[in-house]
Image (tube, grey):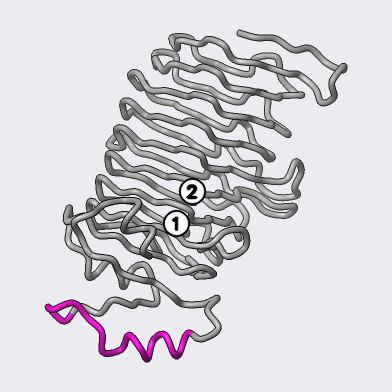
Amino acid sequence: MGNVTFNNPMTGRIFLVAKSGITNESEIKASYASVSYPDGTPMLYTTLKLALASCVASRGDTIVLAPGHTETITAAAGSGVTVAGVRVVGLGSGTLVPTFTFTTAVGASFDVTAANVWIENVNFVCGIDNQTAMVNVTASDVKFQNCVFTTNTATIGAALGILTAATSDRLVVNQCRFLGTATNSGTTTTAQVQYEGAVDIVIQNNYFAGKMTQSILNTATVLRGLIFNNNFVIATGTKAIAVAAASTPFISSNNINVPSGTAPVVAAAGFVANNKYSAAAGVTAGAASTF
């Protein structure tokens, strides 16, 4: 928690969420039982939703998810961030990264409905076939940093990973991984990121892999924006990036492997430069090009 504070200067309060993965959880809760801020607000919570209830919009509050923390989401908007200006940071690495798993209902989702939200080092895992969308973003200036989205496994798949609305201006998705198996017996993911109508969206430094129609999809006109330095392995679909005919993003420096298609990027009005494309696996097989 000290690193979270000193590496990222802030003016708000810090709240800890710890539900599982801590062997001495009862001792931690007991030690924090009488600890609170001067106004009586407790510092330790068992779910993200409970911690958000103590946050104040735009104060600069940070919610820290403990290593190994897990939550299961079974309904639409079952979890998410509803307070503006909050930063959610997961601690831990590998299997200890805090994880939200979706089960039970295809509409189960993690919704970000408040502006200026930062989410970092959190795993999102699809656990039910034909899930409508894992994460819904309806606010502006939201950032996902170093998160993992498992959109499909051998038997199930989410239709969408991240779905944004026309109100999601300046969304940033940076250094995230979107993962899935090459084949599965369930739903083929339509897109791991689908964004609609917002301006200046940035999708950069990410890794996309799995069974999907395309990794990034935009179906309504979007002005400007950047799709930069991403790596794509498209197991089933025919393209990596598809944007609306009148959208004008700058698409540059992406590395793309699409064995099943010949048009890895569809962007009639986009500015496309310095991308690399391979049509097959292996160092000698298939065609490769730079465009």
Q: Position of residue 288 (x, y in %)?
A: 74, 12
CB under 8 Å between discs 1 and 2: yes
Residue position marked by numbered label 2 in the rendering: 133
Residue 29 on the magenta segment: yes
Q: Is residue 12 above or below residue 133?
A: below
Residue at horizontal 18 percent and vertical 56 percent from the top: 11
| Quarter occupied by residue 77 | bottom left
Residue at horizontal 32 percent and vertical 85 percent from the top: 32
Find the distance from the CA under tag 1 to the CA under tag 2: 6 Å
Q: Which residues are magenta?
A: 25-40
Residue position marked by numbered label 1 in the rendering: 109
Residue 12 on the magenta segment: no
* Residue 209 appears in view: yes
Say which of 74 and 115 sits in front: 115
Q: Is residue 80 above or below residue 50?
A: above
Which of the marked residues, 1 or 2, is nearer the chain's N terminus?
A: 1
Q: Is residue 264 above or below residue 66?
A: above
* Residue 102 appears in view: no
Q: Which mark is residue 21?
A: none
Q: Residues within 10 Å of mark 2 (few under 14, many from 20)?
A: many
Residue at the farthest right position: 284
Amino acid type of the residue tagged 1 in the rendering? Ser
Q: Position of residue 124 (x, y in %)?
A: 53, 55
Q: Residues within 10 Å of mark 1 (few under 14, many from 20)?
A: many
Q: Secondary structure at mark 1?
A: loop
Name the quadrant of the N terminus.
Answer: bottom left
Q: Is residue 11 above or below residue 69?
A: above
